[in-house]
Image (tube, helix red, strand yellow):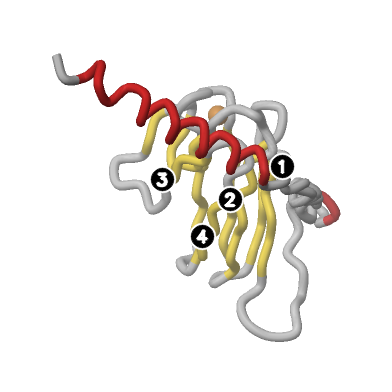
Amino acid sequence: MNRSRSLPAVAALFTTLTLAACGSAPADDPSASETASATAEPSEAPPASSEPSDAGPEQATVRLDGFAFDTDELTIAAGTEVRFVNADGAAHTVTEGTNGAAAADPILDEELQANGVTTFAFDEPGMYQITCLFHPSMNMTVVVE
Ligand SMILES: [Cu+2]
């Protein structure tokens, strides 16, 4: 009931605020000029080969591309770090096992989202079969000498 009496005051205040808001010039915001620089693509690395580096462990890269590993067999020296790079838009796993089934006690079982990367050092000599749990046709062998 008292509301109607205070309405003019509120209206006046509103008008004042509106005028004040209109008085301030809207800032022209040019901050949206952020350039999305493309990140460096690792596509220059030759697939399935370990490159000698200056120091540290040897490294090799395996790409998961087109629902396949880019090499059937990779032979590396013990201690080599292998980078598994998912170049697909779909998720994959890098899992010790065959035909989409993990080994009993897999030394490696990592899920890679699109563009995901994982690195694993193969320290023990032996033959390791690698598969993708999502796509049984994805298989490769890592031979560690
Ligand atoms: Cu897969």
**Callout 4: few (<14), some (14-19), or many (20+) C-alpha neighbours within 10 Å?**
some
Residue lying furthest bottom: 55
Taking the image as shown, residue 110 lies to the left or right of residue 42, namely left
Task: Tell me the number on the disc at residue 117.
Answer: 2
Q: Disc 3 residue type?
A: Asp
Callout 2 touching callout 1 (CB < 8 Å): no
* Residue holding disc 3: 109
Residue 99 in picture, x, y percent from top left: 49, 26
Pointer 2 or 1: first along the chain = 1
**Callout 3: few (<14), some (14-19), or many (20+) C-alpha neighbours within 10 Å?**
some
Residue at image coords 65%, 38%: 22
Residue at image coords 81%, 49%: 33
**Callout 2: few (<14), some (14-19), or many (20+) C-alpha neighbours within 10 Å?**
some
Callout 1 touching callout 4 (CB < 8 Å): no
Q: Disc 2 residue type?
A: Val
Residue at image coords 58%, 45%: 116
* Residue holding disc 4: 120
Distance of mark 4 from mark 3, alpha carbons?
10 Å
Distance of mark 2 from mark 1, alpha carbons?
17 Å
Front-most of residues 87 and 40:
40
Q: Quadrant of the N terminus?
A: top left
